[in-house]
Image (spheres, grey):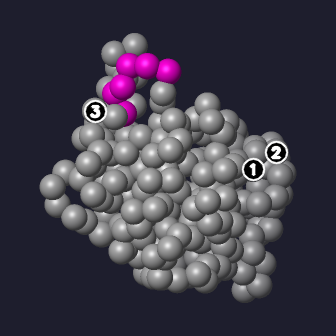
Amino acid sequence: MSNLVRLFIESSLRKDGVVPLDSKQIHYVTKVMRLGLGDKLVVFNSRDGEWHAQITHINKRLCSIQLLKFIRKSESESDISLVFSLLKRGATDLLVEKATELGVARLCPMICKRTNTFKVNVNRLKAICIEASEQCGRVTIPIIEQPETLGNILAEWPRRKGLLFLDESGLGSPILEVLQEQNSWQAHGILVGPEGGFTSAERNKMLENSFIRPATLGERLVRAETAAISALSIYNANMAIDHYKN
């Protein structure tokens, strides 16, 4: 992968197009990365793909780039959604950053009985996703949904798409075994509960749905953000195994 600076650009990208950078991007490009007139970088967005670009104008208040060459189109890294109970700010930030790096297509904040915070700044989470995508080399940015209750998420979840929930009770099957089930069920989402775990009523409600499978990560009881990152890593590894088999 190129070691050029990568920037997410909201505006349309087309060959020979000239794009002005915003103030935050100007600071990053000129002050942090020390780029100057004529230097090259990479820009991308989820609509127009990834492009080589060059700095064509620069001063204290303005920096413009010109698009030079198309590199690759935007393709979803995966079809996996992460449904997660809102955590404290630092833990949520870490989870969102790492989930982006691990290729999650959609982030679904959830509110359940033992959720210990109900405040979330979706724009701040989007900024974390953008920065993580710039750093890790992905071309798309995860979709971030508004927070929903567990009940609403279950009611609206497409029945044809399997949802794996991390069952801290230990009664679920090992996660890799669940992911490798050879039937019509396939995981399209991973659901992670709050720090205090799901209530018995919530767990029973989930298990009433045939599209949901409980899974365990093992004997240790880990933090919610650790569980989410571990589950996504295992999911990616299993997808890689399936890809090489086929």
Residue 4 vs residue 147, the one in the foreground: 147
Residue 93 vs residue 158, the one in the foreground: 158
Determine whether label 1 and label 2 are within 8 Å by CB: yes
Q: Position of residue 98 (x, y in %)?
A: 42, 61
Which residues lie in the magenta part?
179-184
The residue at the point 80 percent across, 68 percent down is 20
Neighbours of disc 3 within 10 Å: few (<14), some (14-19), many (20+) = few
- The numbered dot on residue 242 is none
Query: In the picture, residue 175 is in which quadrant?
Result: top left
Query: In the picture, residue 239 is in which quadrant?
Result: top left
Examine the rendered structure and indicate whether residue 36 appears above or below residue 229.
below
Closest to the camera, between mark 3 and mark 1, is: 3
- The numbered dot on residue 14 is 2
* Secondary structure predominantly adopted by residues drawn in magenta: loop
Q: Earlier in the sequence, mark 1 or mark 2?
A: 2
Q: Earlier in the sequence, mark 3 or mark 1?
A: 1
Label 1: state its secondary structure. strand
Q: Which residue is mark 3?
A: 177
Q: Position of residue 155 (x, y in %)?
A: 66, 50
Residue type indicated by callout 2: Arg
| Outermost residue toward the bottom in this view | 60
Query: In the picture, residue 180 is in which quadrant?
Result: top left
Q: Earlier in the sequence, mark 2 or mark 3?
A: 2
Residue 145 placement, left or right of 180: right
Number of callouts: 3
Neighbours of disc 2 within 10 Å: few (<14), some (14-19), many (20+) = some
Between the residue at mark 2 and the residue at mark 3, the CA separation in whole angstroms equals: 45 Å
- The numbered dot on residue 67 is 1
Examine the rendered structure and indicate whether residue 109 appears above or below residue 216.
below
Between the residue at mark 1 and the residue at mark 2, the CA separation in whole angstroms equals: 7 Å
Label 3: state its secondary structure. helix
